[in-house]
């Protein structure tokens, strides 16, 4: 599927088209290479436009009240004939490219809502209690959050390369829980239909495909642009898609998490009993003595349990490595 989205001088969308096409990829770009070209001034169009369009779309995101989380990722790297874990902050080129994806997702949502049949990615507004909990975490981490400043502004000012800010951004992901897919087939768009973090109607719709849902959203958009009725096989599949996507997301998350867990356990297997400084990024509501901790060095995010009192959410804690078993892909800490 080839999308063409025309923008005005401020980066606002003025026209959308999508059609079937055969695309030949010649450049084989990666984010690091693109960033180097842009920074050195050697990038040619259309790569040179990525920064310009990305920044314009970031300004529009701020204007509409949306937010993008640049959360550092745990990355497995090869080092000294073995493997190690590091936190990797996203490059600006990744954020600019993400704005193109968001732009396409919003354009696709508009096409589907106008046609009366579609599937949206939705997220309810975070409850006040969740934001208050996040504010306490910011205070514990030393992240400045004046009382009058909205949550979105604080997140935008955070520096992913700063370990304390990185831990805060990781905690911010809790406000994204509850995201799902909402289907409509009768011309009546559900309310609410907005994704709270995007601050607009939005869907997952990428080319090349990244998710199963993209396959159906793309077909709906091609039909909408052509003025055709949605294919019957797409209509028939829509009701089951939200559950299928939820199941697939859980499996994908488990595979990714376990891949990192194996490396964490292998790195730490000879350090059982050692003490570390960690940040408590999650606490189970029904088991407040159990949760998740974030270590700066090594770059580990793991389970903590075994204490007698509730874990101090959003605070630094001295912890002891209780278990590291590569065979079971398990790492467990306990309060020191």
Image (spheres, rainbow, N blue to C red):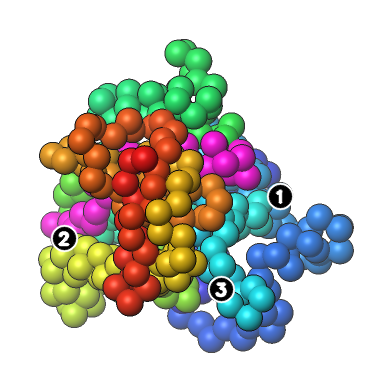
Query: What is the x, y in percent for residue 162?
Result: 61, 40
Extreme front residue here?
273
Label 1 CA crowd tier, 10 Å (few <14, some 14–19, many 20+): few
Q: Residue at x 25, y 47 (%)?
A: 305
In what element is the residue under mark 3? strand
Residue 249 within the magenta-colored segment of the rendering: no
- Mark 2 or mark 3: which comes first in sequence? 3
As drawn, the label of residue 185 is: 2
Labels 2 & 1 near each other (Cβ < 8 A)? no
Label 3 CA crowd tier, 10 Å (few <14, some 14–19, many 20+): few
Q: Residue at x 42, y 38 (%)?
A: 318
Q: Residue at x 29, y 73 (%)?
A: 328
As drawn, the label of residue 197 is: none
The residues tagged by marks 2 and 3 sit, at their Cα atoms, a distance apart of: 49 Å
Q: Which residue is mark 1?
A: 52
Q: Quadrant of the C terminus?
A: top left
Query: What is the x, y in percent for residue 30?
Result: 66, 71
Q: Residue at x 34, y 69 (%)?
A: 325
The residues tagged by marks 3 and 1 sit, at their Cα atoms, a distance apart of: 37 Å
- Mark 3 or mark 1: which comes first in sequence? 1
Query: What is the x, y in percent for residue 189?
Result: 21, 48
In what element is the residue under mark 2? loop
- Mark 2 or mark 1: which comes first in sequence? 1
Q: Which residue is mark 3?
A: 83
Look at the image and give the residue range highlighted in magenta: 159-186
């Amino acid at each position: 599927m080839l999308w063409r989205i025309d923008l005005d001088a401020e980066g606002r969308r003025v026209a959308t088209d999508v059609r079937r096409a055969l695309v030949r990829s010649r450049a084989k770009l990666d984010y690091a290479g693109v960033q180097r070209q842009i920074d050195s001034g050697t990038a040619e169009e259309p790569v040179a436009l990525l920064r310009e369009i990305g920044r314009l779309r970031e300004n529009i995101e701020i204007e509409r009240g949306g937010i993008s989380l640049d959360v550092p990722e745990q990355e497995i790297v090869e080092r000294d004939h073995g493997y190690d874990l590091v936190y990797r902050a996203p490059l600006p080129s990744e954020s600019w490219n993400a704005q193109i994806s968001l732009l396409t997702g919003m354009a696709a949502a508009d096409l589907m809502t106008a046609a009366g049949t579609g599937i949206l990615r939705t997220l309810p507004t975070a409850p006040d209690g969740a934001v208050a909990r996040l504010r306490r975490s910011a205070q514990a981490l030393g992240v400045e959050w004046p009382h009058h400043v909205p949550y979105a502004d604080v997140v935008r000012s955070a520096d992913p390369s700063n370990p304390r800010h990185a831990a805060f951004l990781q905690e911010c992901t809790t406000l994204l829980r509850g995201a799902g897919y909402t289907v409509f087939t009768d011309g009546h768009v559900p309310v609410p239909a907005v994704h709270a973090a995007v601050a607009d109607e939005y869907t997952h719709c990428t080319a090349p495909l990244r998710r199963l849902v993209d396959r159906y959203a793309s077909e709906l958009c091609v039909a909408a642009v052509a003025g055709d009725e949605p294919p019957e096989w797409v209509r028939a599949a829509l009701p089951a898609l939200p559950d299928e996507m939820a199941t697939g997301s859980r499996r994908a998350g488990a595979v990714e998490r376990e891949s990192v867990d194996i490396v964490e356990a292998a790195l730490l297997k000879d350090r059982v009993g050692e003490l570390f400084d960690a940040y408590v990024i999650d606490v189970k509501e029904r088991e407040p003595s159990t949760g998740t901790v974030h270590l700066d060095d090594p770059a580990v995010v793991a389970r903590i349990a075994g204490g007698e009192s509730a874990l101090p959410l959003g605070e630094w804690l001295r912890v002891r490595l209780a278990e590291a078993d590569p065979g079971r892909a398990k790492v467990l800490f306990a309060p020191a």
